[in-house]
Image (spheres, helix red, strand yellow):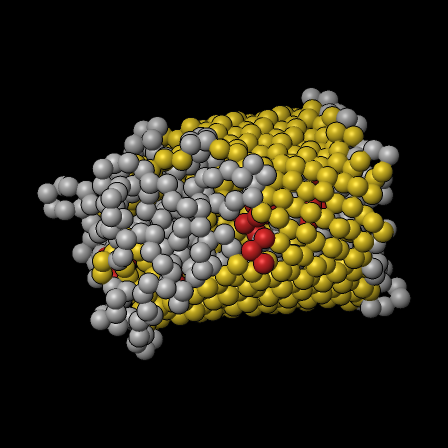
Amino acid sequence: MSKALLSRAGLPRASLLSAGLLLAFHAQAQVADATAPGEPATGNAIATAETEAINLDSVLVVAQRVGRASNGATNLDLAIKDTPQSISVVSSEQMRDFGADSVNEALRLATGVQVDEWETNRTSYSARGFDILNTQIDGVGMPNSWGVATGATDAFGYEKVEVIRGANGLLTGVGNAAGTINYVRKRPTNERQGTFGLGYGSWGTKRIEVDYSTPFTDDGRWAGRVVAAHEDGDSHLRANENARDALYGVVDGQVGENGTLTLGYSYQRAKSDGIMWGALVFMNSDGTQNEWPRDASTTQDWTYWNTTTRTAFADYTHRLGDNWQLKVSYNYRRATGDERMFYAYLPDPDFDGTSIALDPDTGLGLVGYPWGGNDEATAHLGAATLDGHFELFGRDQEVLLGASITRSESNSWERSADFSSPAWGPLPAFPYDTDALPEPAWGDAALYSVLNQHLKRAFGATRIALGDRFKAIVGANYAQYRRDGNSYDLAFDQTTSHTSPYGGLTFDFNEHVLGYVSYSDIYQPQDQVDADNRYLDASQGVNYEAGIKADWLDRRLLTTLAVFKADQDGLATPTGQYNEFGSTIYAPVDVRSKGVEFEAVGKLGDDVDLVFGYTALKLDGLDGDDTYSWVPRRTANLLLSARLPGYRALSFGFGGRWQSTISNVESSGFTVRQGSYAVLNGFVAWDFRPDATLRLNVRNLGDEKYINTLRYSGYYGAPRNYTLSLDWRF
C-alpha cells in the first residue's frame, strides 16, 4: 500500500532521492576569483581572454602561490567568450548583494535555470525544458539520479556557481540536454583577509557567518581558509522552521618546487520542522481552482527532515616541465538523513471514471499517509588528468587526457506508522490545523533499499588553432556506468557504457565578435521503471548550438545570442498508470526541444553592473506542444546594481525573474494553472566605514502571490520579506 500511495503522488521515495543526491560530487581544479588589478571582476565574464582565464585562485607552482587558470566547460584553459557553449556565472558578489544564502537562491540569479521547490525540502532544477541531472563540485561527478536536491545547501562556502547550458558529455561523463551545474569552492587567498557578518530578517530569521583566510608562511607557499555559517528561523508557511550549520576548511600549499597539495573538509547539518511531503491540492470537484492563504500547508507539527553531510577532499598538482602538468585527486562524501513525514493526497479516481477532488463547500476529500525513514550514503572518487601544450601548424595547441573512478553505496530504512493512528485515512476539512493529528507510534527501522553505483571514465580533449581566427575543440568521453542492489526485495544489476563525442568551432569575425557552433552527444542513464519494474534504457540523442558572442564598452560587457536544438530519445515520461509493485509506469518518449537564449553580462559604466537574460523555448513530445506543461516557455532574469555617483559608499540594486504561464493536471484529472508573473527583489547597502557595510534586502518587492511551481506539486511563494545584515572586513 505504501509504495502505491507514493507512486500515485507522482513522487519518488524520499530517502532514495536523498541517497541519489549524495552521488553528485567531484574535486578537481578547486577555484576562487582572482582578478587582475584594473580589470573587471571575472564573475561578470567580460574581461579579455587573458584576464578571464585567471579567474580562479589556486597553486600553479611558480615558487609561491599564485592565480591558476579556470578549466571551464571543457577542462581546457578557455575564456567564457571563447567557449562554444552557453555559460553563466553567479559570483559571490552577486550572491552577497542579493542575499542568496542558499544554493536555491543563488541559482535563481542564473540565466535559463528554473528552480522548482515542489516541497519544502526537495527541489528540481531545469534548463531548456529538461531536468538538470548533473551537479558537480569543482569538476565532474556522478549523475544526480532523479535530479532532485534535498534540503537547502548553504552557499557561503562557494566562490561562484557555474551553469553550463546544453548537453556536456565531455565534462560530466553522462549528460542530457539540460545542462550542468558546477559549484566552485572558496580557496585560500594570497593575502590575509576575513569577513564577519550578522543578519536578521522576516519570520525571526537569524544568520551569522565568518570567512577567514591567511598565509601560514612568510613566502606565502602555504595558506588556509575557514568558512562557517549558522542560520535559523521560521518561514512564511505555517509550522515550518529551519536551521542549518555549515563549516568548510581548506589548506593548500607548495610541495617542493614542482608540486602543490590541497586538503579540505566540509560539514553541514540541516534541520527542518513542519515540512511538507507533497504539497497543496488546488482543484475542487466542480472544476474550480482554489486559492488558499499564502501560508497554507498540509503539514503536521511533528514532522521533520534532518540531514547531515560531510565531505573531505585532497588533490595534488605536479608540473612536468614548462608546458605540462599532472593532477590527481580524491574526494569522499558521507550523508545521512532522518525523516518523519506526513503526506496529504487525493485518492485515485472512482472506477467509473468520476474524478475525486476537494469538496468546495466542505473542504473534505484529502487522505493522510504518515511515513518515517532513515538513510545513509557514502561515495568515493579518484581522478587523474594530464594537460599541456604542444606545437602544431606553427601555433600553440592544448590537449587534456584524463580518467576517473567513482563508487558509491547507499542504504535506506523505513519505519512503519501505527495503522490505528488518525494520521491514516480521511483528513479534516482543509486547511486544517497543524496540530489536528497526533504523531503516530513508529515501528523499528527496516532496510528496504540498497543501491550501489560505479562510474568509470576516460576522456580527452584538444583545442586546435587552425588559423589566427579559426579554432576547433574536439573531445570524447567514454563512460561505463553500473548500478546494482535491491528495492523491496526486487533485485537489479545493470551495466551500460557509451562513448560521447564533443565538438565545437569558433571564428573571430573581429577582435570583439566571435561566432561558434557546437555539437554534443546525449547519454543519460535513467532511474524510472517500466510496467515490469525494470529500469528504462538510457536516454540518448544529440544537442546542437550556434551563437554569437560579442564584447562591448571596451570589453566590459559580454553579450551572447544562442539558438539551440536537442533531440532526446527514450526520455522517461510518466504514463499515469501503475504496475503491480505500485510504481509509476514510465514510457520512453522522444522529446524535441528548441529555442533561443540571450544574455548580457558586465558593466554599463564604472559603477553599474548588469545581468540580463531571456529564454524562449518550444517543447514537443508525446502530448505535442503541451509536453511538460509545467515548464514555462518564456523566462527572463535581471540583476542591476550600481554605486551612487558622487558617494560611492552607497550602493543599490534590483532584479528578479519573470516567467510565462504554466499548468499541470492534478490526480483529480483537473488542470491547475498559474499565470505569468514576476518576482522582483532589491537591496541598498551603505559602507559606513571602509571595513563595514550595512545592507537591507527586500524580496518580492511587489508582494506578488504565485504558486512557486507545478512540477509535481506546489505551494505559494513567500510574500514581501526583509533582511538587514551587517558585514565587517578585516
- Whether residue 284 can be seen here: yes
**Residue projecting furthest to the front:** 361
- Whether residue 178 can be seen here: no
Pick the front one: 567 or 683: 683
Left or right of 602, for residue 689: right
**Residue projecting furthest to the bottom:** 444
Q: Position of residue 635 (x, y in %)?
A: 51, 32
User: Considering only vertical position in the picture, is 605 above or below 44?
Assistant: above
Q: Residue at x 60, y 61 (%)?
A: 231
Tally the marks: 0
Image quadrant for the N terminus? bottom left
**Residue projecting furthest to the top:** 509
Image quadrant for the C terminus? bottom right
Pick the front one: 618 or 503: 618
Left or right of 671, for residue 237: right
User: Considering only vertical position in the picture, is 672 above or below 343?
Assistant: above
Q: Position of residue 416 (x, y in %)?
A: 29, 71
Q: Residue at x 31, y 75 (%)?
A: 441
Q: Residue at x 40, y 35 (%)?
A: 674
Left or right of 402, for residue 31: right
Q: Residue at x 29, y 32 (%)?
A: 623
Pick the front one: 106 or 494: 106
Q: Position of residue 495 (x, y in %)?
A: 36, 57
**Residue projecting furthest to the left:** 352
User: Considering only vertical position in the picture, is 601 above or below 259?
Assistant: above
Q: Position of residue 7 (x, y in %)?
A: 28, 54
